[in-house]
Image (cartoon, rainbow, N blue to C red):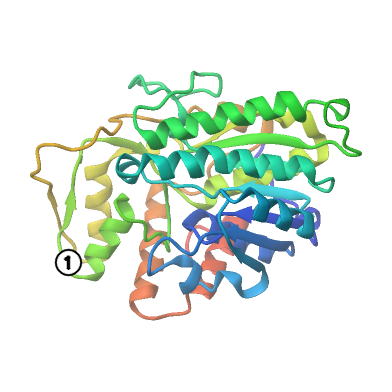
Amino acid sequence: MEDVELSPSFWKDKRVLITGHTGFKGGWLSIWMQRLGATVAGYALDPPTETSLFDAAQVVESMTSVIADVRDLHRLDGFVSEFRPQVIFHMAAQSLVRRSYADPVETYGCNVMGTVHVLEAARRCEDVRAVVNVTSDKCYENREWPRGYRENDPMGGHDPYSSSKGCAELITSAYRRSYFSSEFATGRSAPLALASARAGNVIGGGDWAEDRLVPDIMRAFLSDQAVVIRNPGSVRPWQHVLEPLRGYLTLAERLYNEGSDFAQAWNFGPSDNDARPVGWLVDRLCSLWGPSARWEQDGAQAQPHEAYFLKLDCSKARAELGWQPRLDLEEALSWTVDWYKCFEARGDLRALTEDQIAGFESGQRSI
């Protein structure tokens, strides 16, 4: 199936709620939705880092922003009832593996009960027609298989973060079957279609999360320090943040227009060639940044468990949604470095972010 284009006419004036809009992926999606002419609202905690895409790229320029917690069902339900979204992207999460070891209660509270609260608010609101619950490739029970994980593989998770995302998938499936499987099951005047979306490691400008590879690298480069790498041999499925976001948007359109046929789980990952070792990625970023960039391996012996090899099989999204990656990894890394170089130069990051989205939409290879 050919690579499909998004429909600007579909998104024009649609009421879209994005939970987690102050985060990295949520910020990019918020700006993209504004470009497409949607009426956008965000619901999230304050940005998780002092420096953030949310502030640097002025994400709230043309949207409503509510700073609140998805664990507060009363507040969330009240806002959803007031805003009456037609499409919801649920992206609010505690998204760091190592932080989940330090604070499992926060991780499960946000990722499990937060998901329950969003789906509860959605099912009580007659206007909601499509919900995309964004989870993670780490929701799968990782067997260190050489093949990509498929949507029907078992859920699992070694660490609290990964297992919380497996739980979020099970919750999504239960709500879909119990409340959204038919109009009769919910008593709604219009159907609601619910899907989950699983993506691999995303990169791009504006990610400042602690203990995440590319932000750690960029912070070191900007400070003219050597970046310390824990596991240079670990293989990850790297992709630019715009790749899965286009998958989520494509999926939301199909959910809204065609309903239950697309109310399933979906993988959105890079081409097999872009599943690369951490060491390769760091070497390439050093080359793109310039002579001052350098790295060294962490000498600590004890490290929390992290999967060595994990990638997704995205053949279903290619065949049934017409979605496929547009940027190869070299291009994704180049765009990422361009963004942080603009940050270093105190350039217009909102303009650059929009330029990269426009270039991605048009299939442009360089900005």
Question: Between residues 309 and 361, which one lies in front from this camera angle?
Answer: 309
**Left or right: 178, with 266 as reference point:** right
**Left or right: 264, with 228 as reference point:** right
Q: Is residue 134 visible?
A: no
Residue at 46% x, 34% y is 164
Question: Between residues 58 and 123, which one lies in front from this camera angle?
Answer: 123
Secondary structure category for the residue under label 1: loop
Instruction: Name the spot of residue 94 as percent of width and height, x first.
Output: 44, 47
Residue at 48% x, 23% y is 155
Which amino acid, mark 1?
Answer: Pro
From this view, report whether residue 54 is shown above or below residue 302. Answer: below
Residue at 34% x, 27% y is 158
**Left or right: 14, with 229 as reference point:** right
Instruction: Name the spot of residue 277 as percent of width and height, x first.
Output: 27, 38
From this view, report whether residue 223 is shown above or below residue 99. Answer: below
Check disc 1 and report the residue beneath it: 291
